[in-house]
């Protein structure tokens, strides 16, 4: 009986320790907020009431699982995109996703290609919704797909809405992949962003993948800020360069429709 009692006590202690570790991990994740998305180890430790070394170990584990990530410039932490995978069942409650879905469905029907909705997390475009092409050969953009290449059409759209110094900082800091980061290459890319902003959509004709074409257009919120992008992706063999403007205009029209459904407006547009 004594041995049995000892085993039960040990099991109970182990279970309590496991619950404590889980609670501490959750507390660390909950310390981030929309107002303070970037936090250092010392700040987190003070908020959750744990020693810095304990917080560092928790963050290291969470980072391995993609639940937090380290900002390359400040070395502070923020929530990672792995949280999206955990929150997948709740994505249906995301307003922009819910509003955009019927528009994406019609855009896919109209173009015959995959239509997707992308959000920006500060240095990456992340897919939160998609309607696949009906074609047997197609390009899909599964939920949680991340785009970090500067030539990606969705990344172009998001960067085009940033001040030039902010866009340049992301490009030179290594957060985004741009072949060639000398002054000439950066200036040429920033000029390309000016064209994207003026045209209302961005194009990627085999630049990130030789076999894929992508066009993206911005969705604006009630402040006139970019809330998301609508993306159309297709196999390159089905889209000639002459057809890019047609896809681009289709993406822009769909993005404008999502903007209206959100109650948003383009920057400088009269909202009276």
Image (tube, rainbow, N blue to C red):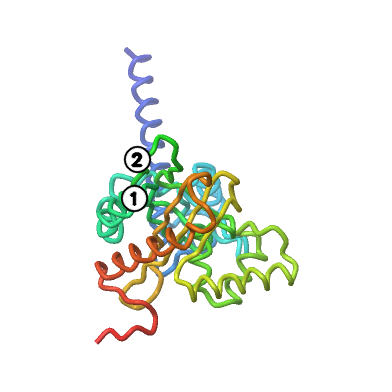
The C terminus: image quadrant: bottom left
Residue at 35% in and 64% down: 255
Q: Tell me the residue that label 1 is attached to.
A: 108
Lateral position of residue 89 relative to residue 21, left or right: left
Whether tag 1 and tag 2 are in contact, CB under 8 A, the answer is yes
Q: Residues within 10 Å of mark 1 (few under 14, many from 20)?
A: many
* Badge 2: residue crowd in 10 Å (few <14, some 14–19, many ≥20): few
Residue sitting at x 32%, y 76%: 265
- Which of 240/263 is in front? 240
Instruction: Look at 59% across and 60% down and name the residue there.
Output: 150
Which residue is labeled 2 in the image?
134
Element type at mark 1: helix
Which residue is more in the foreground, 135 or 171? Answer: 135
In depth, the one of 146 and 113 nearer the eye is 113
Q: Position of residue 107 (x, y in %)?
A: 32, 54
Callout 2 secondary element: loop
Task: Residue at the far top: name it.
Answer: 1
| Residue 135 spot, x, y in % from top left | 38, 39
């Amino acid at each position: 009986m004594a041995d049995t009692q000892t085993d039960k006590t040990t099991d109970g202690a182990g279970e309590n320790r496991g619950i404590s570790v889980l609670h501490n991990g959750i507390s660390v994740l909950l310390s981030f907020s929309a107002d303070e998305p970037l936090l250092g180890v010392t700040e987190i430790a003070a908020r959750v009431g744990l020693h810095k070394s304990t917080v560092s170990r928790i963050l290291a584990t969470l980072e391995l699982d993609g639940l937090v990530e380290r900002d390359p410039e400040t070395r502070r932490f923020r929530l990672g995109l792995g949280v999206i995978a955990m929150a997948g069942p709740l994505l249906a409650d995301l307003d922009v996703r819910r509003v955009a879905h019927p528009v994406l469905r019609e855009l896919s029907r109209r173009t015959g290609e995959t239509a997707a909705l992308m959000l920006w997390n500060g240095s990456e475009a992340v897919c939160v919704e998609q309607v696949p092409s009906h074609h047997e050969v197609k390009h899909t953009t599964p939920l949680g797909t991340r785009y970090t290449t500067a030539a990606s059409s969705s990344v172009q759209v998001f960067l085009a809405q940033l001040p030039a110094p902010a866009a340049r900082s992301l490009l030179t800091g290594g957060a985004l992949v741009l072949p060639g980061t000398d002054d000439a290459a950066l200036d040429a890319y920033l000029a390309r962003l000016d064209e994207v902003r003026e045209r209302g959509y961005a194009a990627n004709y085999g630049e990130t993948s030789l076999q894929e074409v992508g066009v993206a257009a911005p969705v604006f919120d009630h402040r006139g800020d970019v809330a998301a992008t609508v993306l159309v992706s297709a196999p390159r063999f089905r889209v000639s360069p002459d057809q890019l403007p047609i896809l681009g205009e289709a993406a822009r029209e769909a993005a404008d429709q999502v903007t209206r459904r959100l109650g948003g407006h383009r920057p400088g547009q009269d909202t009276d």
